[in-house]
Each structure stands twice: as C-alpha cells, then as structure tokens.
Image: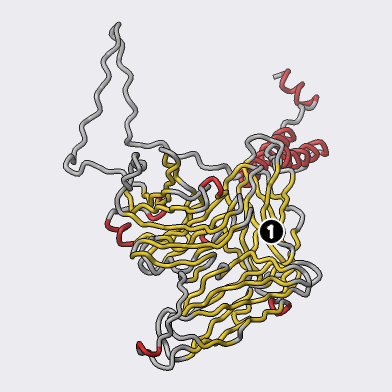
Amino acid sequence: MKVSLSTATAILIAVLVVFALPHLAFAQSQCVSSVTGSASANTVTTGTDFTISVTPASSESGCTVSTLTLSGTPTSYTISDPPASQSNQFSGFAAGTTKTFTLSTGAAGTYTFTPTATTSGGSISGTGVIVSAVDPSTLTVSATPSSAQINLSQAFTLTLAITGSASSSVTTSYTLTVPTGLTASGDPTSSSTQSVPANSSVSLSWTVNHTTCFTSSKTITFALGSNTAAASVTVTGNSSCTTSSNASSSSSSSGGSAGGTTSSLSAKTAKVSIVTVSTGSTKIIDVGLKSNDTSVRRLEFTASESAGGVQLIIDKITSRPSFVSVDPPSGAIFGYIVINLTNLSDSQVSSAKIDFSVNKSWISTNTLDKNKIALQRLSGSTWTKLDTVIFQEEADNIVYRATSPGLSVFSIWAEKPATTNATNQTAAPPEQPAAPAGGEEPVKPLTPETPEQPVQPVDFTTAMIYIAVIVIILVLAAGYFAMRKKPQSKYEYQKKYRS
C-alpha cells in the first residue's frame, strides 16, 4: 500500500495535535505565587526545639494548598509538629494561611530548610531558611554550690550561670532534674526558649528544699540542649532519719515541672506555677501531668502579654461543671477539663496546644471511631470543636493533640455512630405519591436497588493515547480507501457504453 505525502503529513499533524492536547487543554495554572518562611531563632543548640513559620501567598481567591512540606539539609533533624501521623506535613488549607513547623536538630551545622507548597497546578518551593545549630558545649555552665549537705526541712540556694561565647545569641533548652526527697522553687525548672546573649551570662536560681528524709547522697542534674549532664550538684541528707536528727529550720516550696512548678492536688487535679511569662514566650508543661488522671499529658501555650506569679490548676471532671449552663453538641463525653488561670487571663493567651489521652476501653465499649474524637472548647456559651489529631497510640490509651486559641473549659467529645432500629427488620415500602390532577401518572421515585456509581476521575494520559490510536487508524483507513478508488480508463468506459 502506498501512502501519499499529503496523507503522511496529515497523520503526523494528527499525532502531534493529539499528544499536545494534555498540555494545551488540560494544563492548570499554579495559584500560589510565592512561599516564604522564617525561623524563631537563627542559632540554636542541638536538641532544642525551634519553629519555622511558612506562608504560601496567592493573589487568587479560592486557592487551596494540597500539602505544605519542609525539607532540610543536612538531614540530621526531627519534625515533631505536625506529627508523623500527618506525614509531618500540613494538608488542605487556604493559601495565605501561615503554618508553623516545630523541629530540632541532632548534630551541629548550618541547616537550610526549604518549604514546598503543592496545589492542583503543581508545586512551588520557597527560599531556604537558614538555621545554625551549635553544640551545647559552646556554652559554659557553672553551678554554685557544687555540693551541699541539708537535713530534713532545711534548704539552700542553687544558682546556675550559662555563659555564651559565640558571636551571636544562642537559643537553648534546659531542664533541672530534682530527685525525690528534694524540691526546687524559683525560676522555671525547664524552658525551650532560653536566650543566651553572645559573650554574656544568664543566671538561674532556685531554693532547694529537703522534704522527705534520706541519708544517702542525691544528685541534681542540669541538661542543656542535647547535653544531658551540663552540670550537677551533689546533695547529702541526714546522718539518720530520726526525729532528733531533723533540723528545725524549714523552707517550703512546690515541686518542679517543665515550664513551672507542678504539684498534684488530687488524683484528677494538677497545679502548675510559673514565676514569669514574657510577651510572645511559649511555656511547655509536661512533667507531673501524666502521673495523675487529668487526661492532660502536655500543655503548651504562648502568652501575648507579660505576667508574673502565674498559676494554672487543671481539673478533670466526669460530669458537666455546675457553672457551665450549656451542654456540648450531641455526642459521647469522656470527661471535662477545666483550666483555671491566676494572674493570667484567657485573653492574654494567644494560642495553646493540649495533648490529652483517652482510654481505648472507653472507645471500644461505646463503639466509637477513634478518628472522630476531638476537644470541644467553651467560649462564653458556645462550644467550638477544635482541630484535633491522633498524636500517638499506647497499649491502653490514644493520645490526641488539639490546637486551641486559649485556655478555659474543654470537653473530650466523640461523635456517636449512626443508630439503627434493630427491632424493625423489614422496612416499610416508601409511600407512593398521589396522582396529579388530570389523570396523569405520578412520577415514580428512584429505587435504591442500583445506586449511582461515583464518577471515576479521568486519566488524561491514557485517554490521549487511546484517542491518538483511533485518529491514526481513521487516517490510515481513509488513505487506503482513497487509493483503491481509481478512475476508469477510456477503454473501460467505451466497453461499458457499447454494451
């Protein structure tokens, strides 16, 4: 079969047009114009949490970001928020919204973190955010005194000085760990945002009390960033635990905790004391909460104003508090969490994160979906469902993390599954509509015997290949039939005429 040059040209043009269609007709534009990020600190110690805030910008309304990710080099870092259960990424939000990643580094070095936003039109990356990580050993820590001897009910003052030597200030985390038999009051016993100026010192001070008699030596340790033994103090107790050996002088205090001091008031109550909070600072409380039944595992909040002598009392209540006049939305209630603030109002809290646990047995007994459990917050007389995700699963509990605009009254709420009437096994047939005036047949209702199937998304690549094959076959067929139809010769025409 011979194919003319015009036919071959038509085939080539048809193929080019068909394979260009996905790019010409179905390409979607990228609605995000830029992705910018900024870090909470330029220089941090390894092992210290810091944040990177990222904003995908767009001049178009209705631009939705499918995913927002953060990648870094070198790779010795960990993202704790969003958690691994969310693939460490934010999903499905409007462009122009700022999202905050919480992370820490595991090794010293200069890190570059690049944010990437993905929409239906593709992906766009922003300029890398540079954060320097230094070893905590670059900071000098000195404890005064390095050792002490105190009998029961006696106390001494412990002072720790952190000195920076770098050319710029360093943000570090620290934790003072006090063994049983001793308590510490004064400055916060832990912080994740302690700033140490370059070539300058920061001083921390606590009153250490001997509250339960012991005769051996105990060690108070001070961790700085990833250095778990930056400093230590040896404390020797009584020569013997008898009444005669107890000293008469005393100095009382509450127990230590992260971000403040925590003491258990009852099985379902925790008390947290914080010496000072400054504007924009974030306090994290995660010590002393798990040991009691408040359901709260970790509490983090950011203050919008400075305050001193702050106190939080966290209560877990089974039934609705008497001072709450409105019930949460219909659902199953695991319990209520009441957070009372002293010297700090709810309006002075700009944001908070609450980690709380729910018994798996309660979820199973009530036939609930673990993915439909959330924290409801009471503001005025309105309950608002908070953004809640599964943070981790344990043998007997599931730990959730909720993001809240403030601290007040909360309910641990679960959506109840749809109920069915088990006693009515045979459903009554649907009522037939009455015939309209004029004798016309009534419109029959749709039957559910063959439910409408969802429309499957079109695979444009596969569709275009099929279209291309069909067009080529049609063009070749047209050329074939065109060549078979030859004009009659003069001889054939005369023969046909004579006959």
Quarter occupied by residue 472: top right
How many numbered markers are drawn?
1
The quarter of the picture where the N terminus appears is top right
Q: Count neighbours of disc 1 (C-alpha within 10 A) and say few if under 14, some if 14 to 19, many if 20 or more.
A: some
Q: Quadrant of the C terminus?
A: top right
Pointer 1 residue: 40
**Which sits in the foreground, 100 or 178?**
178
Is 112 drawn above or below residue 377 in the view shown?
below
Please tell me which residue is depicted at 67% across the width and 37% down the height of the picture: 474
Name the residue: 74% across, 39% down.
17
The reply, left or right, for residue 489 in relation to residue 123 is right
Q: In the displayed orientation, state which residue is furthest to the bottom.
A: 239
Q: Position of residue 267 (x, y in %)?
A: 33, 65
352 w.r.t. 112: above or below:
above
Q: Residue at x 31, y 45 (%)?
A: 322
Is residue 466 visible to us here? no
Q: Give the residue at the far left of this rendering.
A: 423
Please give left or right for residue 116 compared with residue 299 in the image: right
Indicate the position of residue 154 as horizontal and vertical percent values. Answer: 47, 81
Q: Percent position (x, y) of residue 218? A: 49, 87
Q: Pick the residue in front: 341 or 25.
A: 341
